[in-house]
Image (spheres, rainbow, N blue to C red):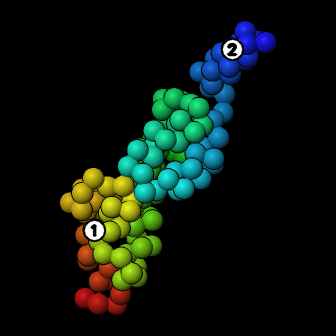
Amino acid sequence: MHALLLEIVSLTERECARGYSVDTDRAIELLRENAHDPDAVQRVCELMRTEYKLLNEAFLADVGSSLSQYWLRERIRLARQRLATPAASVTEVANDLGFSSSQHFATAFRKITGLTPSRFRRVNAGGT
């Protein structure tokens, strides 16, 4: 029985390696559920029992960007939602979304949106 199970697992891994689909919708759902985890991508690979390379290839094919690029854009999207209200500070948003520092968050945010998080908040609060 154990040998049969190992053969099935091995077959599944070979099928994935040959380009069989990886459920990117499920991966996206898991990424959102683990938004606070700085190791969310690794965690999703573990939960889906797939390797980063295979999940990344699926994202390139299904989403049109790498897994890391998608995940960064998704975290910035979540940050924009949080920054649109004054409920949390920029530092809290950065920490909640697993950025290593407020500066790292601000740099990534500006690269994607063209604005610093503070400026984005002011613009979206109706300020100047």
Name the residue located 45 percent from the left edge and 73 percent from the top edge: 81
- Percent of width and height locating residue 19: 62, 25
Q: Give the residue at mark 2.
A: 6
Q: Is residue 99 above or below residue 126?
A: above
Q: Is residue 38 above or below residue 118?
A: above
Q: Are marks 1 and 2 in contact (CB under 8 Å)?
A: no
Question: What residue occupies the far left of the structure in this picture?
Answer: 103
> 10 Å neighbourhood of mark 2: few (<14), some, or many (≥20)?
few
Q: Nearer the viewer, residue 88 or 118?
A: 88
Three-letter amino acid code at disc 1? Answer: Thr
Q: Nearer the viewer, residue 23 or 123?
A: 23
Location of the C terminus by quadrant is bottom left
Residue 90 visible within the image: yes
Q: Give the residue at mark 1.
A: 91
Three-letter amino acid code at disc 2? Answer: Leu
- Percent of width and height locating residue 122: 29, 83
Name the residue located 40 percent from the left edge and 44 percent from the top edge: 39
Q: Quadrant of residue 54?
A: top right
Q: Viewed as shown, does residue 46 lie left or right of 97? A: right
